[in-house]
Amino acid sequence: MPSETVNGFIGRSKELRILEEIYAESRHKTCAVTGRRQIGKSSLLRRFCTGKRNFFIQFYNGSEEQNLDRLSIGLSSFMGSEIKVGSYAEAMKLLMDITKAEKTVVVFDEYTYASASASFVSSAVQELVDWIVSETESMIILCSSEMSALEDEISSYGKPLYGRFPLRLKVGPLSPQETLGFHPGMDRMDAMRLYLTLGGIPIYHSLSTASTYRSNIEACYLRPPAPFSNEAMSIVNRELKDGDKYTRILDAIGNGATTIKEIASKCDVSEQLTGMYLSHLSSIGVVRPLVPMAGANKRERRYAITDYLVAFHYGVIMRRENLIGNREAECYDDILPTISTQLGKSFEFLCRDFVGKAYGCSEVGSWWGTIGSMSEDGIEEEVDTDIDVVATVSKGKDRIDLFGECKFRSRMMGMSDLETLMRRVGGLHGRFNPRYILFSASGFDEDLTDYAADNGVLLIGLDVLFGDSPAPPLG
């Protein structure tokens, strides 16, 4: 089922439920909310505050004076009279009166902007927090896109707010199911294509208003003003200094480099620096190292771009830049093969994430290496290959090894796909308790469906990935 839409607000039922539970408790009255920029934190908190007495302030990335002016405006609006505060301590005293008079939700959005411009602000906020917890029924929320900075404020021993925000809520991307609320009437295949292109960032989906995937790509990437054309680079530049260095790394990965050695060679940068850049990109959720499973070479660590919009930019737009904008009518058709390849890669990441959540896996990754194969001439040879999904599931004393294949294409999966996967697993070294799981965007043919039902093969289609049907049990 598509996610619920309430007064234009889509999804986030889990996050709202968590906040409501905190609000209803008498014991816990504080919460720290984090998440990357544009993930929808502010919209979530404004939705939560709807119908509740609240004081909501969003701090600027500016000076102490600017943020005190912002507090003065907010307090004046709330109290119905002109107020000018000269210090954070004065503002917090007024908020103590507000929170004591009646149950109130206080939200300090982008709090780390305030703490960065005035280091003593947290001492003033500490007094407010302690007051709210001990003397009122109110609730206070600190929110920030600068996740490590907020974590430092509330978790570092000796900092004023240490230990005062034990409850944390990290806001992540919307699920595929939740994004359907932005695209009523769009068919499931196009909706999944769009998710694999944009990820679960609400604002991207709200800007993608066409009814088909093709029309959205043409409007957002291929035709002026092309609102997403520079967004991938903006993401990196907002989060990291010297964005050009990281752009080169991402461009190398988008062109097929996966190991540190390959990426360093393409960028003409030392392997040590390349590893450092990859670590920084990983810290902001743009790049992720692949987890080697089932005996894959752990020394040859592989990397991939896992932010879907960034992956699409460097895997499609940058690679076909010469075709874009020249022949608008035919441009989409020209780059469609590259789009299909990139969406297939992103589909694998989505499937691995799904397996980890749906089956409580202790570890999820993939396998790559060589296995023996018979050539057309009857000669046995070693062939480079991979297994898209490898996961470990513990059920009591038993261990299940899940091996999976992912196909994002227009035709159904059949027995030949399962047999290929079985051959690859059979060529692995080691002892396994294998179960097979197949992911297909276009479903499964009758022979495979019948075989799977009789032999415990798990079949995952778009109906399961969009939450229309439950995940098949492991048994």
Image (spheres, rainbow, N blue to C red):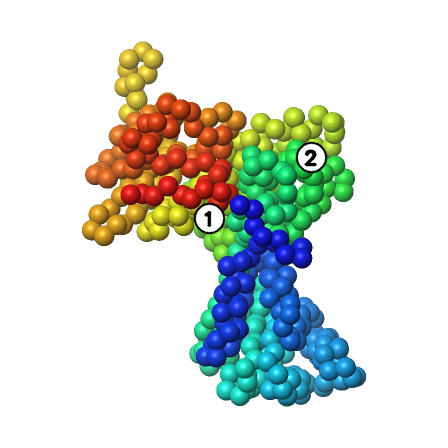
- At x 75% / y 77%, what residue is drawn? 77
How far from the left and from the top, in percent, is residue 244?
62, 49
Task: Answer whether residue 299 is visible to the viewer in this image.
Answer: no
Q: Relative to residue 286, is residue 329 depicted above or below?
A: above
Q: Residues within 10 Å of mark 1 (few under 14, many from 20)?
A: some
- At x 55% / y 57%, what residue is drawn? 12
Residue 70 relative to residue 27: left or right: right
State the residue position of label 2: 215
Residue 152 relative to residue 205: left or right: left
How far from the left and from the top, in percent, is residue 475?
29, 43
Disc 1 is placed on an element classified as: strand
Residue 110 relative to residue 301: left or right: right
How far from the left and from the top, in percent, is residue 237?
63, 54
Q: Relative to residue 137, is residue 419 depicted above or below?
A: above
Q: Relative to residue 130, is residue 418 depicted above or below?
A: above
Please say if the residues under marks 1 and 2 sit with CB atoms less than 8 Å apart. Answer: no
State the residue position of label 1: 288
Q: Earlier in the sequence, mark 1 or mark 2?
A: 2
Q: Amino acid at mark 2?
A: Ser
Residue 408 relative to residue 9: left or right: left
Q: Nearer the viewer, residue 42 or 12?
A: 12
